[in-house]
Amino acid sequence: MSQLKVGIIGTGWCGGIRAVASSRSALVAEVHIAETDADRRQEVATLTSAATATADWTELVDHPGIDAIMVSATPEDLHHPMAKAALTAGKHVLLEKPIALTLDEADELIGIADDGGLKFTIGYSQRFNAKQAMVKRAITDGTLGEVSSILVSRHITRSLGAKISSRTKLSPAAMEATHDLDFAFWCLEPRRPVRVYSQNAWGAREATLGVPDTQYLVVTMDDGTVVSVGAGMSLPPGYPNQSSTWIEVLGTEGAVLVDASHRDVVLNTVQNGVQFPLSTMPGEYVDHVYAGPMERETVHFLEAVAYDRPVLVDPHLARVVMEVYVAADLSAELNEVVSLPLTPDQIGLAMAGLYVNRS
Ligand SMILES: NC(=O)c1ccc[n+]([C@@H]2O[C@H](COP(=O)([O-])OP(=O)(O)OC[C@H]3O[C@@H](n4cnc5c(N)ncnc54)[C@H](O)[C@@H]3O)[C@@H](O)[C@H]2O)c1
C-alpha cells in the first residue's frame, strides 16, 4: 500500500477535525486543504503541516496526485458541485451530510461514484459512537429478538442551531434527524421505510430565524416496525454543551435504553457555571485522545481507500434517508401522512418548498 494524498475542502469545525485526523494518520503522506477564510486556512495548514493550502477548491480537484477528497464546506448548497467535481475527477469522496439538496443531485453523485468504482460515503458520524455501535450489535446478533420500535430524541443547543439555521433554512429533519434516520435504517436493514408523518414545533427560533425549534417524525417500516425521531435545535446554554441524545430500542426479547445526554462529566466554573464538556456531535481532541466519533470515521474512510475496503455508510442508504426527510418536510407542510416512494409530483412539490416554511 502506498500512502495517500488527501484533500479537505472547507476546514472549519468538521473539516478541521478531518484535516488533523488525516495529518495524524500513518496512511497519509500529504494533506492538501482548500479554505476561503484566510486566517482559518493558515491555522489548519500549520496544524496539519499541509503540503498545499489554497482558497480555490478546484485546485484540489485538478491535482493529479490527490487520491481522496473530503468535502466539509458550508453552506450546504456547495456539497453537490464540490462532490460532483471531485468524483468526476476520479477522487474517492467523503461528503458531509446532507448528501445534496435534491434527490436528483444525490442520484447523480451516486451514479458517478458507482460508474467510476469510487469510494463515496456520507458523514453520518453517529454510527462511529461506541453507544450506537453497541445498539447495532444488540440488534444484529439477535440479543433483542425482533425489533418493534426505535426512538431517538436528539437536541442541540440554540447557539449551534443558530449557526446552522443562519446559513441554511433546511429543516431539523434534513440537518439533524438525518443522523438518526440513517442510524435506525442501518440497524433495521433490509427493512425499508414506507410511510412518514411529521410535525414541526415552533418556538423560540421562529422570531429570530424563521425556523422551527423541533421536528418530530414517525416512520413506518415495511414490516410495521416504527421509527420515531425528534430533532431539536433550541436547548438553552445551561443544557449539555452541544448535543443531548436519548435512544430506546424495543424488541421481542429485550430492550436497550441509551443515555447519550453527556451529563457524566460536569465542569463548573465561577465565570460560566455548569457546563457539560465532551458533548459535541463530531467530538473533539482532548490532548492525545479523541472524544467522539469523527476521528474514527475519518480514519475508516482513509482505510477504505487505502486497502480497498467497503465504506460503512453506503450512499444508497443515504439516498433512502434523504427521501424520508424530504417526505417528512412535505408531511409537515401538508399536515398529512406521506407514503413512500415519493411520486414525481410529490418530489416536485417538496423541492419547490425545499426550505422549511411555517404552515
Ligand atoms: N457529522 C457531524 O457530526 C457534523 C457536525 C456538524 C456539521 N456537520 C456537517 O458538516 C458540514 C460542515 O459543518 P461545519 O460546522 O464544519 O461548518 P463550518 O462553517 O464550521 O465550516 C465550513 C468551512 O467551509 C469554508 N468554506 C466556505 N466556502 C468555501 C469554499 N468555496 N471553498 C473552501 N472552503 C469554503 C468556510 O470558510 C468554513 O471554514 C455541514 O454541511 C454540516 O452539515 C456534520
Image (tube, rainbow, N blue to C red):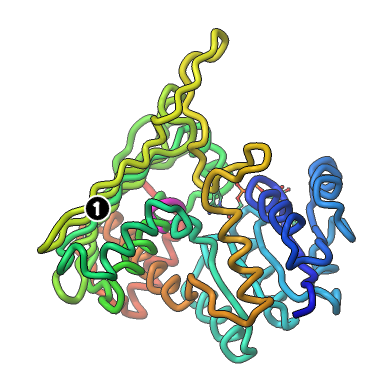
Asked which quadrant contains residue 118, the reply is bottom right
* Number of on-image labels: 1
Q: In this view, does 260 lie above or below 85?
A: above
Residue projecting furthest to the left: 252
Q: Which amino acid does label 1 sit on?
A: Leu
Residue bounds of the magenta highlight: 174-178
For the point 65% across and 57% down, the residue is 72
Residue projecting furthest to the right: 52
Residue situated in front as seen by the camera: 127 or 232: 127
- Residue 261 point in image, percent of width and height: 37, 37
- Is residue 53 among the parts visible in the rendering? yes
Q: In this view, does 324 lie above or below 74?
A: below
For the point 57% across and 80% down, the residue is 309
Q: Name the residue under label 1.
A: 151
- Residue 357 point in image, percent of width and height: 39, 49
Label 1 element class: strand
